[in-house]
Each structure stands twice: as C-alpha cells, then as structure tokens.
Image (cartoon, helix red, strand yellow):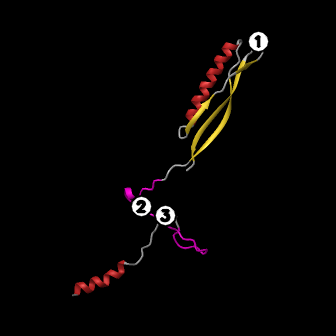
Amino acid sequence: MLRLCAALLFLPLMAFAQNVDVKNVDTSSTPNGETTTIEIRKGKAAEMKTDAQWEVTEGDADINGDAAPVGKEAKGNWDKACKEWKKEFRDDNKENKIISMSCGKPDCSGDAGNKTCTSKATYKLKTKIN
C-alpha cells in the first residue's frame, strides 16, 4: 500500500513540461506573442521528403574565334572557342540540369588576312530553386 501511495505521489511530478536549453536560441515568448518551436525527429519515418522545384532558364552568349589569315583557319579557331565554351558551361553548371546548348552557326567576316568567325550561342537549363 505504501508503494502504491508513493507511485501515485510521484506520477504527477513527471507530467510537468520540461525546459529546453538550446545554445543561442531564446525560447521564451516575446512581447508581441511570437513563440519558438523546436522540432526533433528521429528515424526513417521522421525524414521529410520534398520534391525539388526547378525553374527553366534560357540565355545566350557570344562566341568569338581568334583571327586567322584565311576563312578555313578562322572557322577552326571558332570551333575551338565553341568547344571551350561548352566545357566551361558544363563545369559551371554541375548542379543544374542542362536541357540544351548550341554554339549557333559561325559568321565569318573580315579583310583578307584577318578573318574572324563569331556566333550567338544559346542555352536552356533547369535550375534547382530550393
């Protein structure tokens, strides 16, 4: 009987709310009624899975090949510039998804002995928002 009474007296003491002490977080209520909620989850059931949100971005860039004495060499220089642009674009966008990228068609012009090829490159990629 004594054990039952002791258990009944001890039970209400365990029902009180407990305080949480989190470094640099003031958990007390503020004068305007705001409160702080701290949530702790454990296990696989607690993992929150959210679908990633994506945004499609389009843009363009100028590609300029180095000057060359003849059109064929100028086109070769433009091809090198195109490959370099594609490589840098892929390296800079590893976390995004490239949908399309094109160097466009080269437009070669200039005086004899000083030909250059240029184009307008276009790209489209999906950027992760969250």
Please name the amino acid that badge 3 sits on: Lys
Residue 40 shown left or right of residue 118 in the figure = left
Q: What x and y, as percent, mark residue 31?
A: 60, 75
Q: Which residue is mark 1?
A: 112
In magenta stretch: residue 120: no
Q: Amino acid at mark 1?
A: Ala
Q: Residues within 10 Å of mark 1 (few under 14, many from 20)?
A: few
Q: What residue is disc 2 on?
A: 41
| Marking on residue 7 | none
Tell me which numbered mark, 1 or 2, is placed earlier along the sequence. Answer: 2
Q: Answer few, some or many: residues within 10 Å of disc 2's Cα (few below 14, many 20 plus, some between 14 and 19).
A: few
Q: Are marks 1 and 2 in contact (CB under 8 Å)?
A: no
Q: Earlier in the sequence, mark 2 or mark 3?
A: 3
For the residues carrying marks 2 and 3, which lies nearer the camera in this image?
A: 2
Q: What residue sits right under mark 3 in the picture?
A: 23
Query: Magenta residues, as a range?
Result: 26-49
Q: Name the residue at the left extreme.
A: 1
